[in-house]
Amino acid sequence: MKRSIIVIAATAIGVALCPAVALTILAGAVSAAATTTAITLSPAAGPPTTAATVKGTGFGPGETVNVDFDTARAGTAVTSAAGSFSTVVRVPAAALPGRHTVTATGQASNLSAAAFFWVRTNWARFHRGDTNSGYNPYENVLSPASVAGLTKTWSYPTGAAISFSSPAVVNGVVYVSSTDYSVYALDAATGAKLWNYPTGAEDFSPPAVVNGVVYVGSDDGNVYALDAATGTKRWNYPTGSAVYGSPTVANGVVYVGSLDNNVYALDATTGTKLWNYPTGGFVLSSPAAVNGVVYVGSYDGNVYALDATTGTKLWNYLTGGEVASSPAVVNGVVYVSSKDHHLYALDAATGAKRWRYTTGAGIEASSPAVANRVVYVGSGNGNVYARKAATGVKLWSYHTGSHVYASPAVANGVVYVGSDDGNIYALDAATGTKLWSYLTGSSIDSSPAVANGKVYVGSDDGKVYAFRL
């Protein structure tokens, strides 16, 4: 309607003025009418509390613009003389997983534009992130009050056991390795297979997904980089033996251990070896990369701290048994378990022992999870333990029906862990009370992934399971 009125006015004026003037006025009116009001978000996806930059164009000059996240006010901005603005808004902590609408409305012009923001709480690798904490701080769907309502939403049968490979969940896709010689990508909502990549041997390594690439090890001795969307191989690097641990990718470098006793640093884009550090035993441990230091355990009984750039050893701490566990590095402390029946807390800067706790049996492969100043770990005696992170003082223990080789995962007051009794358990993080369990067809050595209000885990029965409310 506004455009029609302007065109009519210009035509009327043209009767009194020359045709050239009338055409100029008409062209200006059409140009103004074609101006597009729009906003863009950067990033356009992320977890709750993400700081997103909202940029707008095509608004009125010098006007106040209100920015809403769904129906709640998230921020305001004042436009430039050209009608553009840029402001930062924070995604509400209570925003649930899924698509949300961000709307910008000019208070003088009443012009409006909208864009979508996707709330996602990805679990990108074993124990979620580079610190190996096993903690998802963004979970806001599952809680101690609701987790009893979990039900199986789907299961996908691979061709063989899923032993120790933990799912990664990124942007609506579940990635997992199987001992049927394949790496799988499954639709996180339905379990439908998107692709699989055949390696040359059994696969125990949990995949890590970073910047659209899946990094994973294989029993054939290779580290693979696969396109996350298609499964196409980008590169592979042959180590001297099987690769069981999950790669850690930080600052463009892949850190991974091998049963040839070495820790490797590879260029994430090309697979070129940057350095390797020889330990005295198998490296099944998944490295943690924190503040320029790589922390990793070895079957020679040591925990190592290596310079992330050069591979130079900064310190090592000798435990009394093999270390298959992956260190968790939180608040300047390295938490790691050993087959000598102990859970250790070491100073991240020096390697000095802060405390040690004795369990009733060897801790074969269960890696500690750390959340809210508490450490959680499983043991070969069937127990899951909760200890104060600062002192090692015991808070509680929960006895499952068999060995606990799996590594716990923690999210929103709930500890999730598998047992060789075939169950995945949800325990109250504060008390250890069992809130929920589900019996699969075989033992669970896979560490659960908790993402977007769902729980994913692999079982030795060959299936990947997904649970939701």
Image (cartoon, rainbow, N blue to C red):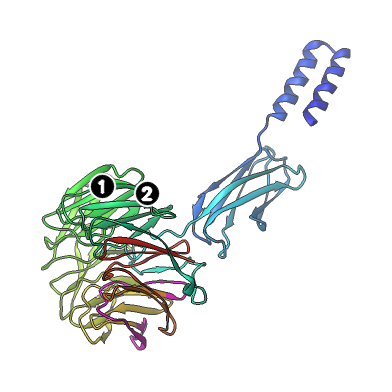
Question: x, y percentage for residue 330?
Answer: 36, 72
Question: x, y percentage for residue 111?
Answer: 72, 42
Compared across the picture, whether 179 is left or right of 157 comes to left
Q: Three-letter amino acid code at disc 1?
A: Tyr
Residue at the limit of the structure toward the right, as seen here: 16
Residue position marked by numbered label 2 in the rendering: 211
> Which residue does the image show at 24% across and 57% down from the upper left?
178
Of the two numbered discs 1 and 2 in the rendering, the one whose residue sits closer to the viewer: 1
> Which residue does the image show at 51% across and 73% down from the upper left?
146
The answer to which of marks 1 and 2 sits earlier in the sequence is: 1
Q: Which sits in the foreground, 373 or 164? A: 164
Q: Which residues are magenta?
A: 386-414
Q: Three-letter amino acid code at disc 2?
A: Asn
Compared across the picture, whether 298 is left or right of 171 comes to left
Q: Which sits in the foreground, 446 or 206? A: 446
Question: x, y percentage for residue 166?
Answer: 30, 63
State the quadrant of the N terminus: top right
Kindly tell me whether residue 33 is visible in this rendering.
Answer: yes
> Is 407 part of what is drawn in magenta?
yes
Q: Which sits in the foreground, 433 or 366? A: 433
Q: Which mark is residue 197?
A: 1
